[in-house]
Image (cartoon, rainbow, N blue to C red):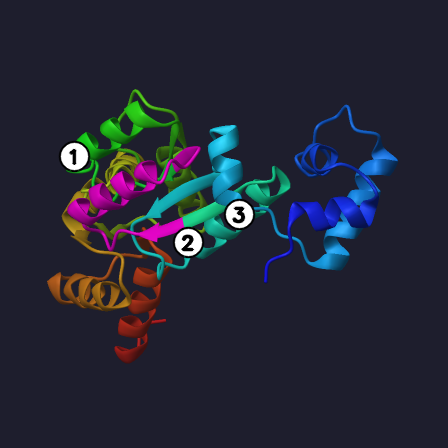
Amino acid sequence: MAVTIREVADAAGVSTATVSRALSGVQTVDPELVERVRQSADRLGYRANRVARALRRQSTQTVGLVVPDITDPFYPAVVRAIERELRRAGLSLLLCDSGNDPEVEAELLRNLYDHQVDGLLVSACDRTASRPAVQLAASRTPLLQIDQRAVAELPYVGVEQADAMRQVVEHLLGQGCRSFGYLGARPETSAGQERLDGFLAHAKQADPAAADRVQLGDVSVAWGYEATARLLEAGPAPEAIVCASDLAAIGALQALRERGVS
């Protein structure tokens, strides 16, 4: 049987109202009293009724996160960082994976704001098809786009993709490379488009033929392998291959190794 707030109050020698204020973080409660209440609650194994508390506060103290593919090595690190920061703020995370499907993404966003999350984080799986659902969700609850965006007018946190590509190309030029190939995702996402644009803007200055060595598919190991094989079959190998994802880079390395290319 669940421990009640009355039992905690009796154990701490205070009223139920004091227990409620102490456990909800009300600053007017004496710190020593708060500690006594918390120790009693911990000793008895008391857990607050989150549903009742949410109704009372008009807040679920949860944030929803929708990512396009949790198997992409990029996202677990992002999720871990987000969850750590939310925990520091006393909030919980609800994580959803859209599977790179805009319709699934839209359904997940609806489910999250129907559950009255206090905010939404979304990495849009398609910069065009995701737009209506993201706009609707933002009209219902505070929303932040992360890494990939669909609505330019809404808040966004992510990498400066064009500048990242500038740094990559400049590094390779510094290593003596003068011809470039590129393996990237089709520009269905904002990140995919921005990386491609950034690569072309900087690589073509040193290698006008770089645009002819662009291979666009997805971000998988299999695609990296296939795209590299195509580059090598199409003519002289470029001195450098820029990969827009770690998984594609792994596939590229496998294809090069099998063909005896260092």
Highlighted magenta segment, given as a residue range: 95-120
Q: Is residue 34 magenta?
A: no
Eyeballing the image, is 29 above or below 6? above
Eyeballing the image, is 49 above or below 134? below
Q: Secondary structure at mark 2?
A: helix
The percent coordinates of residue 202 (x first, y second) are: 31, 36
Circle 1: residue type:
Thr
Circle 1 residues within 10 Å: few <14, some 14–19, many ≥20: some
Q: Quadrant of the N terminus?
A: bottom right
The percent coordinates of residue 163 (x first, y second) are: 40, 34
Residue at the spot of label 3 = 83
Circle 3 residues within 10 Å: few <14, some 14–19, many ≥20: some
Q: Is residue 102 magenta?
A: yes
Residue at the spot of label 2 = 74
Circle 3: residue type:
Glu
Q: How far apart are the alpha carbons under marks 3 and 2?
A: 15 Å
Circle 2 residues within 10 Å: few <14, some 14–19, many ≥20: few
